[in-house]
Image (cartoon, rainbow, N blue to C red):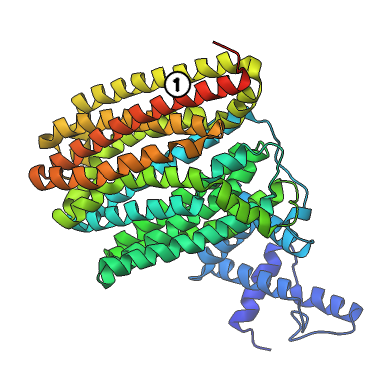
Amino acid sequence: MSITPLDSIRRAIARRNGVSNPAASRDGAAKAQGGRIENGLFPASHTAEELARIQELSQRNAGGPDSSQATRRRRERDRKPGPVRRMVNAWWNRLLGAVYGGGFSMQEAKYEEHATSRDYLWNTLGTAVWGMAFPLLTIVSTQLVGAEEAGKFSIAFVTGTLIMIACNYGVRNFQVSDIDEKTSFASYQLNRWLCGALALGCGLTYSSARGYDAQMATIGLGVYLYKVIDGIADVYEGRLQQADKLYLAGMSQTLRSAGVIAVFSVALFLTRNMPIAAMAMGIAAIASLVLVTAPLALLETEKSRRMSLREAGHLFIQCAPLFGALFLFNLIESMPKFVMEGALAYKYQLYFNALFFPAQGILLSIGFIYKPQLLRLSSIWANPRKRRRFDLIIVAVMALIVVITGVCAAFMAGPGIPLMSFMYGLSFERYRTLALLMVVAGGVTAAIDFIYAIITVLRHAGDVTKIYLICFAVSVVLPVILINLLGLMGAVVSYLAIMALLLVLLIIEYAHIRQRIERDRNPYGA
C-alpha cells in the first residue's frame, strides 16, 4: 500500500506522541471499538474537538503557512479576559438577568451606600468630564474643520444647553432634597420624560424658526439629542444621589460624557463632516442611557411606588418657579451669544466660548464643593439650632470663590493665553484683556449659582423670579447696543455687566428672605 503525504503527517504526529506504530495501535483500538478503521491509521469518525486538534497539530508540524495562526488562535482561546472585559461581561450578564428575572427593581443591589470618599471622587470626575466636553469638542472641531464650523457647533451647543435645562425643569435639587420621598421616583421619571419630549420639540421648532439650512439643522438635531438625554439621565442620577450612592451617579455621568467626546472626535476625524459627528454624538448618548444609566439606577435603589399623574403634574407646579428662574438665568447668560449669531460671523462664537471656558472652570470647581453637600445643607437648615453653622458655610464658600477666581486670573495673565493659542491653533494674544474680564465674570457666575442653590434649599426659589425678569430685560437691550458698537468686546462687557447686576440683586433678595424667615419664626424678635 502506498503512503500518501497525509499518512506521513499522521505518522509524524503519532511518533511525537510516543506511538511507534500508529497503524498497529489503531488496529488494536479498532478491534476494541468494533473495527472502526480507515486506511489502518485513524478511526473513521472523530469529535469536532479531535478533528480541530488534529488539524492544528498537522499544520504546526508541517510548518505550513497557517501554523502561526493556529498557535495564535490557541493562545487567544486560553488567555483570560482583562479587567475591562470582565466588568463589561459581568454588567451585561446582570442586565440580562434583570430582564429575565422579573425586572430591574426586583434585583438585589450590589454597591454600598455612605461611601463619602468615592462620592467626592466620582462626582468630581463626572462633573469635570461633563464640563470639559464642550471645550474639548470645540478644540477638536477647530483643529479638524476650522473656526467657522466650530462656531456653528458652539452656538448649537449653547442652544442645546438651554434645551437640557428645560428638560431638567429645575427638579434635581428638589428631588435630592426630598428626604421623605413625598413624590415617588416613578413620578419623577414620568415628569422628566415629558419634559424631555417637550424640550426636544421646542429645539426643533427653534431651528425651523431660525431658518437654518440642512447642515446647521442636522448639527442642531445631534446636539439637541445629546443634551436631552443628558437631562433625562439626570433624574436617574438624582435617584442614586437620593439613595446616598452619588459615586454611581458620577460613574454614569463620566461614562456618558467620555463616550460622547470619543464618538464625536472619531466620527469627525474620519469624515471631516460636522453633521455626521453631531448625530453620532446623539446616538452615543442614547446608548449610554439605555445600557448604563437607567438600569444602574433601577438596580441599585429600592423599588419605587407606582407613578402618579397627580404627583408628576404637581412637580410641574412646584418646580415652575425654580425652572423659570434657572431657565431665565441661562437665557440671560446666553443672550450675548444669540445676538452675536445675527451680528457677527460664526467664528466669533468660538472665540467667545473659548474665552469663557477658563471662567467655567471656576463654576465647576465650586460645584464640586457644594453640590454633594446639598442634602446635608438641607438637614442643617431643618434644625433651627444649626442656623449659625449654615451661615458660616455660606461665607466660607463665597470666600473660596474669590480665591479661586484670583488664582484663575493669575493663570490667564501668565501662561493661559499662550496655552489657549496652542490648543485651538488660533491666536488669542489680542484678547488678553477680554480673557481677564471673562474670569471675573466666571467668579460672579459661580457666586450666582451658589446663592441660587441656597435659596432653593430654603424653598424660596419663586421669590427670585422677578429678579431674573429684570435682568432678562436688560440682557435683551444691552448686548444689542454693545455688540453692534464694539463687536466681541461688547459681548464680553455686556455679559459681565448683566451677571454683576444679577448677583447684587440676588444677595439683596437672599437677605430679605432670611429676614422674613426669622420674623416668621420669632414674630416678637427685634
Q: Quadrant of the N terminus?
A: bottom right
Given residues 313 and 357, the one toward you in this image is 313
Given residues 171 and 269, the one toward you in this image is 171
Q: Quadrant of the C terminus?
A: top right
> Where is residue 233 shown, x and y percent of the image?
54, 52
Crowding near pointer 1: few (<14 within 10 Å), some, many (20+)? some
> Where is residue 355 shown, x and y percent of the image?
23, 38
Query: Which residue is pictured at 68% across the width and 31% down the height?
Result: 114
Query: Which residue is pictured at 10% across the width and 36% down the height?
Result: 430
Given residues 48 and 407, the one toward you in this image is 407
Given residues 77 and 409, the one toward you in this image is 409
Visible residue check, residue 483? yes
How many badges with numbers are in the image?
1
Q: Which residue is mark 1?
A: 397
* Image position of 35 (left or right of 6): right
Q: Amino acid at mark 1?
A: Val
* Image position of 210 (left or right of 178): left
Q: Residue 310 lies in what quarter of the image?
A: bottom right
* Image position of 207 (left or right of 111): left
- Secondary element type, mark 1: helix
Instruction: State the residue lying farthest toward the front.
Output: 524
Instruction: State the residue lying farthest toward the bottom.
Output: 1
Relative height, residue 142 to residue 276 (above, below): above
Visible residue check, residue 362? no
Query: Which residue is pictured at 39% across the width and 52% down the height?
Result: 162
* Image position of 408 (left or right of 122): left
Q: Residue 452 lies in what quarter of the image?
A: top left
> Where is residue 483 shown, x and y percent of the image?
14, 45
